[in-house]
Image (cartoon, grey):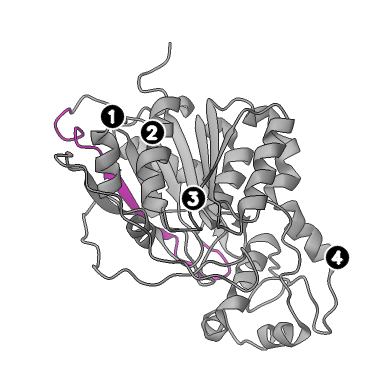
Amino acid sequence: MTRTPFPLALAASALALLATPLAAQVTTLRPPVVVGAAKVRIEHVVVHSDEIAGNLMGTSSERDVFVVLPPSYDQEPERRYPVIYALHGYSIGAEQWLKEIHMPQTAEGAFALGTPEMILVFPSSKNEHNGSFYANSPTTGNFENFLADELIDYVDSHYRTLAEPESRGLVGHSMGGYGASRIGIKRAERYGALYLMAPCCQSPLGSRGLTAEQVREVEALPSVAATGQLPFALRGPLAIAAAFSPNPARPPLYLDLPVDAEGGERADILAKWNANAPLAFLDQYVGKVRGYRAIALDVGDKDGLVADTTRMHQALLARGVQNTLDVYDGDHTSRLGYRFQNHVLPFFGKSLAFAPEE
């Protein structure tokens, strides 16, 4: 395992699938430094995934993962810690996600302000279409299984964790909020607490306004690599299709779009997309979801995702699943650092088990 420095430049990134037209992410505000906060240590590791290996897109099965170790980790060699898994949004990877939440400063600040120390894990799930949507697919590879099974097993075997669900948290933002919702609902038995930050795509997505001309442009592409030349607004639907409507019989992209080359919507493909909306499959897993120690959602009041986030909050309540929703002053990204330091990490500090339960 090696530790690698982060580049200094904060590259511009973008959101997809949240609104039309697509909105660009903005620079995130940095909370004040907590004076005297003890330093964390960040390790960059590469984790092999058998679940992702062999995918039709050719996405690497060697996944970058950043592990944030708390200040006491090296000083207290017998101590074990809860683990938080944090999922990034569309068009960025884990390294950029760390920058947008101002890591390591925000973890150091949270711990210094009284949040119990935890291990934080940031896996990278970006692919050739800018995002895996954290799904299982022969086209993209099984990112859901990688995160819920292989990565947990890797972290528990390489770090001093409290390797029980009640000491394990899951959080994500935007597409990562979708991933946390998807995995957190379907694989609820693996986690003790769940936090959704402005999650996208909770409701069925529809056909994303695809036109016949766009479909013909996509169908003329000679390879997955050639999709990089497409307009950004068109790459998002490809990411969804690769995750939700894979088709191993249709090279070179190995996916089906929900609109045909004449501009007609394809009901069979839309049905597959709709089935991947957490609000569509929540009822199948609600018995497991009721087992969470705590669930929280948040979203900025100027974020186009307020309505969808509220729908998930209300759907959980209607099914007897207690959860909180915080609609705060901000847009989709502006206050991510503040939220992570002052809300997300304290939430897990109060919700998870910090010692083995009898």
Element under disc 3: loop
Element under disc 4: helix
Q: Is residue 191 visible?
A: no
**Label located before the other in sequence (1 or 3):** 1
Q: Is residue 178 magenta?
A: no
Q: CA distance from mark 4 to mark 1?
A: 52 Å
The rendered magenta stretch, by its main secondary structure, is classed as loop
Mark 3 lies on residue: 329
Q: CA distance from mark 2 to mark 4?
A: 44 Å
Q: Amino acid at mark 3?
A: Asp
Choose between 129 and 103: the one closer to the eye. 103
> Image quadrant of residue 311?
top right
Q: Amino acid at mark 4?
A: Ala
Mark 2 lies on residue: 346
- Taking the image as shown, residue 327 lies to the left or right of residue 42, namely right
Depth check, mark 1 against mark 3: the one in front is 3
94 is higher (above) or lower (below) than 13: above
Q: CA distance from mark 2 to mark 3?
A: 19 Å
